[in-house]
Amino acid sequence: MNKIVAIDGPAGSGKGTVTELIAKRCHLVNIDTGATYRAVALAALRNNLTIEDKDAITELSGKIDITFDEAGHVYLDGEDVSSEIRDKEVTKFVSPVSSIVPVRTNMVALQRKMAEGKDVIMEGRDITTVVFPNAQYKFYLDASLEARAKRRFEQNKEKGIDMSYEEVLDNIQKRDYNDMHKEVGSLIRSDDAIYIDTTNMTIDEVVDKMVKIIEGD
Ligand code: DC
């Protein structure tokens, strides 16, 4: 059976960074499920759709081709959109887009397909609960709101994304609310996921702890 490591947690909990590092150390394919929703949001924006156009966004989500390469680049209909999907506009639009139930159905099916026959590590909001509830390894990463906003602010600076700390904090708060109040696929801490509070931990400490668990048996 293929190995599945499932990780959930709120924005800025460190799951994106640790997932990348664990993927390399444990030779797992990294499937960034947030990127699939971001690609749908980008496609919708390019088609001048608003959040009122739920049917059109749903249709679009079933039509577009979303793929990843081995280096983790994200392609929308063959075009590399890895940096564009992190733009401010996409980041604001993606949470409501990911609340559209049939869009989630399409993305969950796509994510499961991407994992077929591979040893994978997947991070998102509903991986441990909906996409792969029977994964061998399930983690929930968390951190205080301030720590998460600070991390995201620093990450943005490194990537040249121009957002004030207040703007980042506000964005994360709104996303937390949306992520936790979805009709389907809400961020839920499942009882059988290993809970790690990363507020006062370095990335390396988090990675070491998780790798020990993954490779411990
Ligand atoms: O992890 P991220 O910031 O790239 O996620 C982008 C958005 O997609 C975020 O608002 C939550 C949503 N998302 C989701 O609903 N389900 C997932 N499995 C992953 C992300």
Image (cartoon, rainbow, N blue to C red):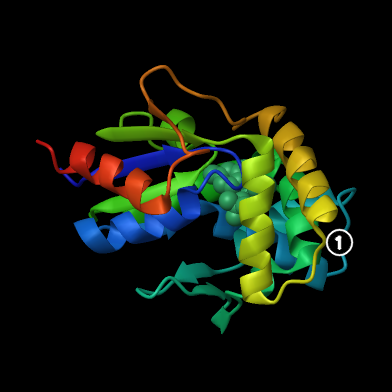
**Residue 106 position in % (x across, y down):** 57, 48
Location of residue 25 (image quadrant): bottom left
Q: Is residue 70 above or below residue 215?
A: below
Q: Amino acid at mark 1?
A: Leu
**Residue 181 position in % (x across, y down):** 72, 27
- In the picture as drawn, the residue positioned furthest to the left comes out as 217
Using the image as rendered, state which of residue 59 and residue 3 is in the foreground: 3
Element at label 1:
loop
Residue plotted at (59% across, 39% down) = 10
Location of residue 147 (image quadrant): top right
**Residue 62 position in % (x across, y down):** 61, 57
Residue 55 appears anywhere in the view: yes
Characterize the local packing of mark 1: few (<14), some (14-19) or many (20 or more) Cα atoms within 10 angstroms: some
**Residue 125 position in % (x across, y down):** 55, 39
Location of residue 84 (image quadrant): bottom right
Residue 32 appears anywhere in the view: no
- In the picture as drawn, the residue positioned furthest to the bottom comes out as 79
Residue plotted at (61% across, 54% down) = 151
Residue denoted by label 1: 49
Q: Is residue 202 above or below residue 134?
A: below
The N terminus, quarter of image? top left
